[in-house]
Image: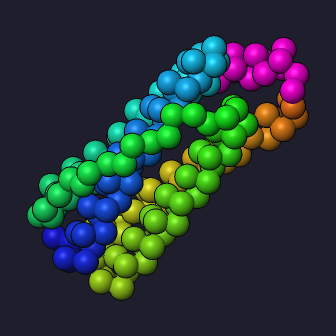
Amino acid sequence: MPTKAVESALNDQIAREFESAYLYLSMAAYFEAQNLSGFAHWMRAQYREELEHAMKLFNFMADNGGKVELKALDQPPSDFGSASAAMAETLRHERSITASINELYELAMQEKDYPSQLVLQWFITEQAEEEKSVGDIIAQLDLVGDNGSAMLMVDRRLAMRQ
């Protein structure tokens, strides 16, 4: 059973994961409006992945005697300015989630909450992958610049995400 401090922090993290999903769904809508269906597809996949992350923590709490308390979510923005700006916001957001997971892991260590440490190890690895993935897209967008044809090639590649 998570300690009270870890339980509270896990509930906060569940909310952050749901907020991430909500943000990425909003980005998918933005990209659809920009006729960048590949970017929209990528964001929808990211949305589903964030829901899975929230549910992984939800199930962990439920299976280990913790009390899940769902929190209200903030409305995400709906205009991101450009594909590059949206992806930069995605990287900033993922870095904030990484910092939150790291703080949660440190708390679990201080509280000697070993089961929580184990589940959080998975999240630490996942966040490294998330940041790399988004960083790679940003690097490609930097190469593309204002070239519309090249942007469509990036869009097509993002449409292939499973």
- Asked if residue 147 lies in the magenta stretch, the reply is yes
Relative image position of residue 126 (x, y in whole percent): 51, 51
Which is more toward the observer, 70 or 108?
Answer: 70
Q: Position of residue 91 (x, y in %)?
A: 63, 49
Q: Is residue 12 magenta?
A: no
Residue at 25% of width from left, 77% of height from top? Answer: 5
What residue is shown at x 69% (from left), y 20% (from top)?
155
122 to the left or right of 65: right
What is the tally of numbered marks visible in this picture?
Answer: 0
What residue is at 43 percent from the left and 56 percent from the top? 122
Query: Image height check: is 154 above or below 127?
Result: above
> Where residue 87 appears, x then y in whole percent?
66, 40
The colour scheme used to paint the residues is: rainbow
Relative to 95, residue 78 above or below: above
Q: Residue 111: in sight, yes or no? A: yes
Asked whether 53 or 77 is in front, the reply is: 77
Q: In this picture, which residue range is highlighted in magenta?
A: 146-162
